[in-house]
Image (tube, helix red, strand yellow):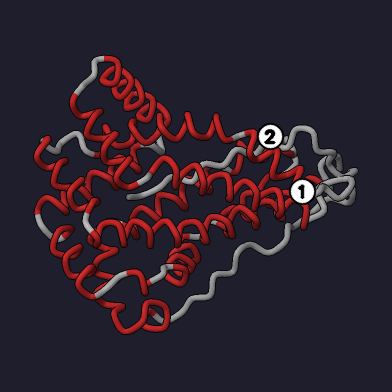
Amino acid sequence: MLRRPFLAFTIAGFALCAPAGFAQSAPPAMQAQVIAPDAVLGARAPELRALLGAMGLYDILAIMAAEGRESAPDLEADMFPGQGGAAWMAVVAGIYATDKMTAAFEAALPVERLSDADIASLRAFFESDLGARIAAGEIAARQAFLDPSLEQIATDLAEERAAQNHPRIAQLTEFNIVNDLVERNVSGALNANFAFYMGLSDGGAFAAPIPEEMMLAQVWDQEAAIRAETVQWLLAYQTLAYEDLSDADMAAYIALSRSAAGQAINASLFAAFDIVFNAISHDLGRAAAGFIAGEDT
C-alpha cells in the first residue's frame, strides 16, 4: 500500500535564466504546521495513530525523508553542478525534515474516508502476527533500498523470478492490480514532476515564462519511462519485503487489500502522499531555481 515517490527532474528544452548573484539561500521550504494530534486526525486520533503505527507508516515516512535528503547531490549535479554545496544540502534537509513531513501527512490524510469499523478491522489485521511481519518486512526492505547494491540484488531476483514465471510474481502482480499501485504511482509521479516544474517557474528559473501546456507536455513525455521504472521497482521492493511470507500469508494480504477497509486505507494513504509530495516537489523546484540563478558565480 506504500508508494515510492518517483521524480524525473528533466528540464531539457527549457532555457534557464541567466546567472545572477549567488543564491546564498533558496526560497523557504515546506512549512508544515505542527498541530496537536486531535486537531489533525480528529476524535479518532489515538485509533488512527495506532493503526498508522502498526502499519509502519511513520517508519516509512522517516525513510522517505532520508531518501529525499540523499537525493540532493544528484539533483545538484543535474541542475547546477558544483554550485549548491552545504547551502543546498541544508535547504533539502529542511524540505525533507521528518517531523514536517509527518505533520503534513497527518494534516492531508482524508480521515472521512475511514469508518470506525474500517479502522478496527485494519488494526486487528496489522496488530496480528501476520500484520506485524508484513509491516516489518516493508520497513526493512525500504531501509535496505537506501543501499543501491541491495536494491540491485532485489531487482535481479525479481527479474529472474519473472522470467521463470515464479508463482510469487503472479501474487505480487495481483496485489498491485488490487491496490492499483502502478497507476497510482505513475499518476503521483507525473503530478509531482509537474509541481516541480511549477516550482522552477515560480522561482524564476527560466529565461522566459514557460506555458503550462509545454510543461505538461514535457511531463507526459516521461510517462512511459516512469511506468517501466515503477513496475520494476514495485516488484523488486515487494520481492524483498514479502520474502518471508508464505503464499497463504500473501493471499491473506491480498484479501485484506480487496476488502472495503483495505481499499479505503489505500485510497487515503495515496491521497495524503500526493498532497505531501506535490508540496515537496514544488518546494524543491523553487529552491533549485534560486541556485540555478547563481550557478556561474
Where in the figure is residue 96, as x and y percent of width and height? Answer: 53, 56
Q: Is residue 248 left or right of residue 135?
A: left
Please give the name of the residue rendered at 59% of the width and 60% of the height, measured from the top-left corner: 279
Mark 1: which amino acid? Phe
Please give the name of the residue rendered at 15% of the width and 58% of the height, measured from the top-left corner: 125
Where in the figure is residue 239, as x and y percent of width and height? Answer: 27, 32
Q: Which element carries disc 2, helix, strand or loop?
A: helix
Q: Mark 1 or mark 2: name the one nearer the start of the chain.
A: 2
Please give the name of the residue rendered at 26% of the width and 37% of the height, measured from the top-left corner: 174
70 relative to 97, above or below: above
Please give the name of the residue rendered at 51% of the width and 49% of the height, measured from the top-left corner: 188
Q: Which residue is mark 1?
A: 291
Neighbours of disc 2 within 10 Å: few (<14), some (14-19), many (20+): few
Neighbours of disc 1 within 10 Å: few (<14), some (14-19), many (20+): many
- In depth, the one of 85 and 16 nearer the eye is 16
Q: Which residue is mark 2?
A: 78
